[in-house]
Image (cartoon, helix red, strand yellow):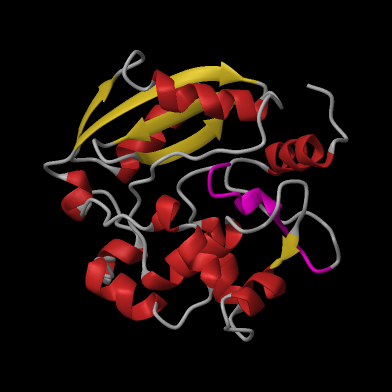
Amino acid sequence: GWQESPAFRHGEYVNDAIYAAGYQSSSLVYEQVHHILGTTPTKYRDGGKGITMRYVITTCRLGYLLVAATEKGVCKISLADEIEALQADLRREFPHADISYDEQGLGEWLQPIVQYIDGETQTLNLPLDIQATSFQRKVWAALCQIPYGQTRTYQEIANMIGQPSAARAVARAIASNPTAIVIPCHRVIRSDGTLSGYRWGVERKAALLALESGDDEP
């Protein structure tokens, strides 16, 4: 079978109780992104068994763009040079889900992402349905607080979540972000200002940062 992610293996699923317990003493940072990360996610157990998922692929300035969603919200946004790579990655992550292609039904969520990549909008407010550990959720919420056109270092994100010694764990959480652009992991760079890795390609990371900083003309 497919290799499960660490979050699946350890059974660290976020539910209302864990979310409330972990965030009562946190800053307003997390309350402000509650609309993005505050819903109880679908339980993606057994590779998505029993989950109905739809996806769509389109071309954009960064190559091919895939958006996949459950009935609750977007569960995956990815970029690649080839359609087949996007489809294989989706199937690898959710091998037992009921997945179908739905260009019409996902248009309302696909369009704003393409507009963002084209520089036509600077905000994205899409419902997300993503599985995460409580630590990943804290990190991803912090990423959503980085203003458009700005960057932060891994250490600065660790400081933001109140765990200054956890920069390496922060880097791992950032690398596991399943939703490109909407959770803006591309805005995190090394302390020396250079670009670190990006699961969808460092060239795409550079292009997104250039777009947001105004150094790029759509």
Location of residue 211 with respect to 137 vertically, above or below: above
Front residue (pair 99, 88): 99
Percent across and percent down for residue 10 are 27, 72
Q: Which residue is drawn at 35% across and 65% down?
A: 6
Front residue (pair 174, 199): 174
Percent across and percent down for residue 119 are 71, 27
Would you identify the image quadrant in which residue 194 lies? bottom right
Residue that protrudes farthest toward the top in the picture: 104
Percent across and percent down for residue 78 are 50, 36
Q: Relative to 8, is 186 on the left or the right?
A: right
Location of residue 97 with respect to 10 vertically, above or below: above
Q: Residue at x 27, y 41 (%)?
A: 72
Percent across and percent down for residue 212 are 76, 39
The reply to whether residue 144 is visible in this rendering is yes
Would you identify the image quadrant in which residue 159 lies? bottom right
Would you identify the image quadrant in which residue 120 lies? top right
Location of residue 157 with respect to 218 vertically, above or below: below
Front residue (pair 202, 161): 161
Quadrant into which the C terminus falls:
top right
Q: Which residue is drawn at 45% across and 66% down?
A: 136
Residue that protrudes farthest toward the left in the picture: 50
Q: Is residue 206 magenta?
A: no
The reply to whether residue 84 is visible in this rendering is no
Q: Relative to 43, is 118 on the left or the right?
A: right
Location of residue 203 with respect to 115 vertically, above or below: below
Task: Give the magenta-colored segment's residue range.
Answer: 181-191
